[in-house]
Amino acid sequence: MKETTEQIKERHDMEIKESSERRTSEIEEMRERHGREIEELREKCNHKKVSDWMESQWAPGHGGPRVKVCNNCGLVMDTEKWNLNVEVGVE
Ligand SMILES: [Zn+2]
């Protein structure tokens, strides 16, 4: 049986729909894309402007060692040696 033009069009629409559903979500693609852009930026950056010591957080609300980061690309340039005893107040 020969497909009519209309049937071919329907089949193509169906195939396009199915393939777009298999794709990863847009937010995942965006994160991937931005991750690559940040990597490229950091490779090109000469890290000339570095911040003063600032608090880092290894998780929201949990302070980590102080760090210096590049003001342009955000790369951590230096990490303060972190004394756990100071953090919990042990002499
Ligand atoms: Zn940099």
Image (cartoon, rainbow, N blue to C red):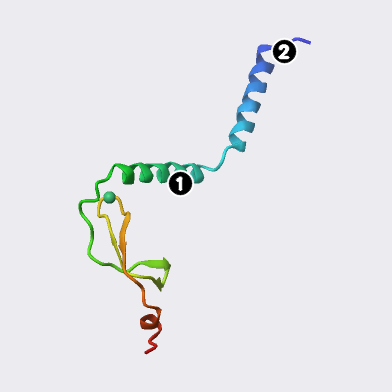
Crowding at label 1, few (<14), some or many (≥20) Cα neighbours within 10 Å?
few
What is the x, y in percent for residue 49? Answer: 20, 54
Mark nearer the N terminus (1 vs 2):
2
Q: Are marks 1 and 2 in contact (CB under 8 Å)?
A: no
Q: Nearer the viewer, residue 11 or 76?
A: 76
At 67% from the left edge and 22% from the top edge, which residue is drawn? 11
What is the x, y in percent for residue 75? Answer: 32, 54
Q: CA distance from mark 1 to mark 2?
A: 42 Å
Q: Judging from the image, what secondary structure is the residue with disc 1 in? A: helix
In this view, 28 is above or below 5: below
Q: Which quarter of the figure is the N terminus placed in?
A: top right
In this view, 32 is above or below 5: below
On the rendered structure, is 3 left or right of 16? right
Residue that lies at the very extreme toward the right in this rendered image:
1
On the rendered structure, is 15 left or right of 74? right
Quadrant in the rendering for residue 66: bottom left
- Mark 1: which amino acid? Arg
Q: Judging from the image, what secondary structure is the residue with disc 2 in? A: loop
Number of numbered markers:
2
- Mark 2: which amino acid? Glu
Which residue is the site of mark 2?
3
On the rendered structure, is 77 left or right of 90? left
Residue that lies at the very extreme toward the top in this rendered image:
2
Q: Nearer the viewer, residue 13 or 62?
A: 62
At 38% from the left edge and 80% from the top edge, which residue is drawn? 87
What is the x, y in percent for residue 69? Answer: 28, 58
Q: Which quarter of the figure is the C terminus placed in?
A: bottom left
Quadrant in the rendering for residue 65: bottom left
Crowding at label 2, few (<14), some or many (≥20) Cα neighbours within 10 Å?
few
At 67% from the left edge and 16% from the top edge, which residue is drawn? 8
Image disc number at residue 31: 1
